[in-house]
Amino acid sequence: MLKIIFSAFIFFYTSLSLALEVTVSEGTVKAMPIAVTNFFSDNASASKIGKNISMVISNNLERSGLFNPLDNRSFIQDEESLSKQPRFEDWKIIKAPYLISGQIVKKDEKISVEFRLFDVFSQKQIIGQKYETSEKNWRRVSHIISDAVFESITGEGGYFDTRIVYVAETGPKENKQKRLAIMDQDQSNHRFLTDGSYLVLTPRFSPVLTDGSQKITYMSYVNRKSPRVFILDIETGRQEIVGEFPGMTFAPRFSSDGKKIVMSYSDPEIGNAEIYLLDLEN
């Protein structure tokens, strides 16, 4: 389970006062220029992580189609002086309406990442946040920052700190191997959740639970002739069958609170498939 400590600071005005101006011309959307600077650190190891964070943020914003990250070779102010105070006139020269700056501190296996988003032309800070977590979570922090920037400027929730679960198919056409796989929305952190020794279908996420964990429900034929619904814990890899029923269970979905599963059940004595609600806590 990932653990990230979050704090917000120096909040001058909220995203409710902002609106991204989108120009539609001949069926195209003109992307908003934005300066995403490398996150500053006087430590070489931390500086490398800071550059990776800014690269992921830049890539996320560009893929949204609403932002056009400026080439950092055009930047006049360096990261070290920017970490103290922006020289807004420098950023106006390169026509950057928005500016992202940041700092990173590394101690042992922990990192502290701080970022600020500025409105260059009004010379005001829009939002500032700080995250403390383990070094291995740097990419997750990048996605969280991307969401904060996206929402602050557009007024809409971001989608960068999300994951995709799907059924990966490999092998020859006559003997396809199906495995559950998961990855971040930008295709990073890809891994397989099952080994392909049995068929898996229809994976669905649970909501994030109160302890910060998340699970997946899916249908499988594990050691059985009839399909069964399973639950898999993403972090531990532990799998368990949902109920012992004489017939088939399939097409599972979690309830909005993650405490129940809705699934189809076909009773062999009745024949028809019906929809059932199963309480996972009882």
Image (cartoon, grey):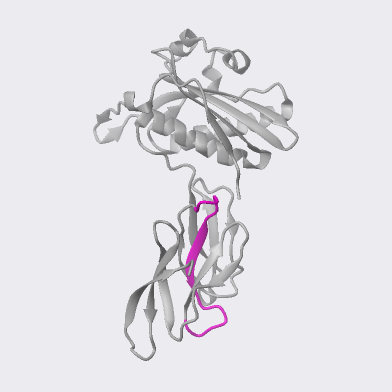
Along the line of sight, which residue is nearer the eye, 249 or 193?
Answer: 249
- Looking at the rendering, the stretch of residues picked out in magenta corresponds to 209-226
Residue with the most extreme left position: 26
Q: Residue at x 36, y 74 (%)?
A: 276
Per the image, is 19 magenta? no
Q: Residue at x 55, y 53 (%)?
A: 213
Task: State whether residue 216 appears in this view.
Answer: yes
Along the line of sight, which residue is nearer the eye, 140 or 269?
Answer: 269
Q: Quadrant of residue 119?
A: top left
* 201 lies left or right of 17: right
Q: Residue at x 43, y 28 (%)?
A: 68
Residue with the most extreme bottom position: 269
Residue with the most extreme right position: 108
Q: Residue at x 51, y 33 (%)?
A: 145
Q: Quadrant of residue 232?
A: bottom right
Task: State whether residue 20 appears in this view.
Answer: no
**Residue 266 at what x, y percent from top left?**
37, 82
**Residue 29 at what x, y percent from top left?**
31, 33
Give the main secondary structure of the magenta stretch.
loop
* 205 lies left or right of 42: left
Q: Is residue 281 above or below residue 227?
A: above
